[in-house]
Amino acid sequence: MKKQHKLSWALLALAALVAGCAAVPSAADLNKLTRDVVKSSFRDEGIVKASVLLEGDETIQACSEADATGVPLNEAKTRALEAANFKSIQWPANDKYLGDWKEGEKIAQSGRGLTWTDTAATPNGGNCYNCHQIDRAEISYGTIGPSLYNFGKLRGVTDPKSPEARAMLEYTWGKVWNAKAYNACSNMPRAGHMGILTQAQVAHIVALLLDPKSPVNQ
């Protein structure tokens, strides 16, 4: 009941502002009011923590503000955020960047995990198909992100274990681990950084993208 009262008062305040019963609100005022309304509507449930979803870190806050105001981040702020995210990348133990592409395909096609009914031990999927085409056999996939079909082939990776492929190997790992290291306000989830995928799972995804035998590169 208490939450309902808070929500009701917030909505009434918003209606009053829109109706002109108060001074014209600034973008900052409206953003704060929106955050308050959203916060009053969510709670922690199981492994899902409302604070993580609603507050985020400096990168999330800065990009959310830029999106809300329509004012993009300046270059200095963008570079600073990307540098901070790059430092957070955990590179693979024992320099093992490549896993099994077959396992990577399973992970990429799975959207399982991270719901309030799951436990911390529940293996998560990568949900990659929701934003990307992965191979040409797919008939349904998201288009928020670019197609990943021929990802390695288009980049000339014929042997991902070769010295020539090292830079692309590291880039692919880093991009999957924390995409915001390369694009501060990327829509791509920070799979490794946020604990969505383990190091072993990231290695499987990297193999899916770069192994010449993977359906991605056929």
Image (cartoon, rainbow, N blue to C red):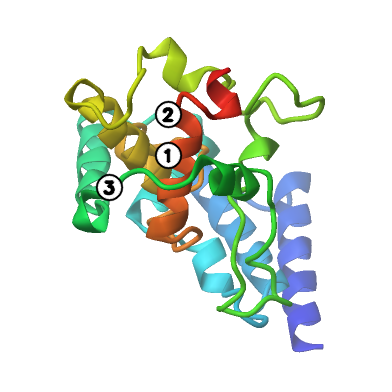
- Residue that carries the numbered disc 1 in the rendered image: 206
Q: Nearer the viewer, mark 3 or mark 1?
A: 1
Cβ atoms at labels 2 and 1 below 8 Å apart: yes
Q: Secondary structure at mark 1?
A: helix
105 or 90, which is in the foreground? 105
What is the crowding at mark 3: few (fewer than 14 residues within 10 Å), some, or many (at least 20)?
many
Q: Secondary structure at mark 3?
A: helix
Q: Nearer the viewer, mark 3 or mark 2?
A: 2
Q: Which residue occupies 27% across, 51% down?
A: 89
Residue 148 appearing in the image: no
- Residue that carries the numbered disc 3 in the rendered image: 85
Above or below, 162 against 201 in this view is above
43 or 25, which is in the foreground? 43
Q: Residue 52 appears at what percent x and percent y? A: 50, 67
Q: Residue 91 appears at what percent x and percent y? A: 24, 51
Q: How many angstroms separate mark 2 from mark 1 (CA)?
A: 6 Å
Residue type of the residue flagged with mark 2: Leu
What is the crowding at mark 2: few (fewer than 14 residues within 10 Å), some, or many (at least 20)?
many
Q: Residue 175 appears at what percent x and percent y? A: 37, 38
* Labels 3 and 1: the sequence-earlier one: 3
Give the tally of numbered discs. Answer: 3
Question: In the drawing, what numbered circle is on residue 210?
Answer: 2
Q: How many angstroms separate mark 3 from mark 1 (CA)?
A: 19 Å
Cβ atoms at labels 3 and 1 below 8 Å apart: no
In this rendering, position of residue 2 left or right of residue 134: right
Residue type of the residue flagged with mark 3: Asn
Q: Which residue occupies 42% across, 39% down?
A: 206
Q: Which residue occupies 48% across, 31% down?
A: 209
Q: How many angstroms separate mark 3 from mark 2 (CA)?
A: 23 Å
